[in-house]
Amino acid sequence: MIGLAAEWNILPERPSTLTATPAPLSMTLPIKPPRGRGTDRNPDNRYAAWSRTAEDDGWPQEEDAAPPGTTLIPDTAKTVIARNDSPDLPFDRSINPYRGCEHGCIYCFARPSHAWLGLSPGQDFETRIVWKADAATRLREELAAPGYRCAPMGLGTNTDLWQPVERKLGVSRAVLEVLAQTRHPVTIVTKSALILRDLDLLATMARQHLAQVGVTITTLDKELARRMEPRAASPQRRLEVIRALVDAGVPTVVMVAPVIPALTDHELEPILTAAAAAGAWNAHYTLLRLPLEVESLFRDWLARHYPDRAHHVMSLLAQMRGGSTDDAHFGRRTRGEGPLALLLRQRHDLARRKLGLDRILPALDCSRFMPPARNGQMDLF
């Protein structure tokens, strides 16, 4: 813990429910976000009883100001497995030891969840990371419960388990170790090269049909990726991750997500071609959706970086989202609707077949699951 203090500000342990604390109001309007961050905006918490309005008071802006650091907030949650009943997901349970993500992806659909913690979905989401230090212990307890029934576990479904802070904290590694020890099947989604640190566990699990990985690639344009996903691995590095996983025997899928009309949609076929060359087994895509605060953050980002096409991007997205920028309905939220959405789907399916990205992944094997030993006197019976 001493080694972490030099790089991050670590707050004292706090309960899962955090009290809303307004961040200092910036009275200047920077031209671009701080280096390494997706946004400088910190929209007010939608659950707060107050709101603020920024005004330009004419003072010169500090363009060379140091980027804000990361604050780590311990989470004392009593459980670590989250359940869902979504028909759009191939699993009914997941683990997310981190809330918030240093990758800073401006389009991230998980940003609004930071409001539940009394924090902002804007820069707070990238700089105030809530982490479950005892996630592995809680997981072991839940897997040992008499009523637990094994089914594939999703990792990285909300925020990335292998985001930069994981390099020092090692919480995701500890969680994966528990799953490997108990032979519990997992499906993983990440855009981080840090996952290769855990290739020893994943390769062993894959040989037992216990692991599958999806690597997300949004664009092959390095400059666009730097602006849109400032602390995530570069596109080329993600292709290398696919190759390394496949070489180790891990079934790997490329996730083209999200597809952004008039910004990245023209890269669909090139991304699939590059992923196929790297050895990916299969491919999926999702269409951009902008829930709650994400819409204003994304609009602001577009206006700053791509003002010439900002209106066109939002217009096309609305045409593919039934007149809105978000659609939470099952079956539509990942693919959209209308002629343009149908054309995107046809392009994906055609390229997928031509490139051989339609291999069937081996079914995950739940029969190998071995519950961890329960602690206490009842273990004697």
Image (spheres, helix red, strand yellow):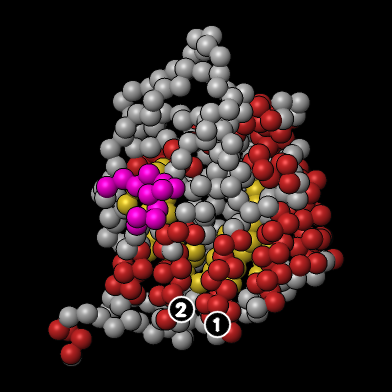
In the rendering, which numbered label is found on residue 341? none
Quadrant of the rendered structure where residue 147 is? bottom left
- At x 29%, y 83%, the residue is 373
Q: Which residue, as the protein is rendered here, is positioned at the far top?
A: 58
Front-lying residue, 126 or 381: 126
- Tell me what residue is drawn at x 41 percent, y 69 percent: 174
Q: CA distance from mark 1 to mark 2?
A: 8 Å
Q: Could you tell me residue 188's position as x and y percent?
A: 55, 65
The crowd level at tag 1 (other Cα within 10 Å; few <14, some 14-19, many 20+) is some
The amino acid type, in three-letter code, at marker 1 is Thr
Corner quadrant of residue 313: top right
Whether residue 229 appears in this view of the structure is yes
Region of the chain picked out in magenta, as a range: 1-12
Chain-order first, disc 1 or disc 2: 2
Pick the quarter of the image with the C terminus. bottom left
Mark 2 residue type: Ala
Disc 2 crowd rating (10 Å Cα; few below 14, some 14-19, many 20+) is some
Q: In percent of the image, x 38 and y 77: which residue is there?
A: 149
Circle 1 is placed at which residue position? 204
Q: Position of residue 365 (x, y in %)?
A: 52, 82
Residue at the right extreme, as displayed: 354
Q: Which residue is mark 2?
A: 180
* Label 2: element kind: helix
The residue drawn where x is 75% and y is 71% is 279
- Give the quadrant of the N terminus: bottom left
Give whichever of 89, 329 is nearer the camera.
89
Whether 250 is drawn above or below 330: the answer is below
Q: Is residue 43 left or right of residue 15?
A: right
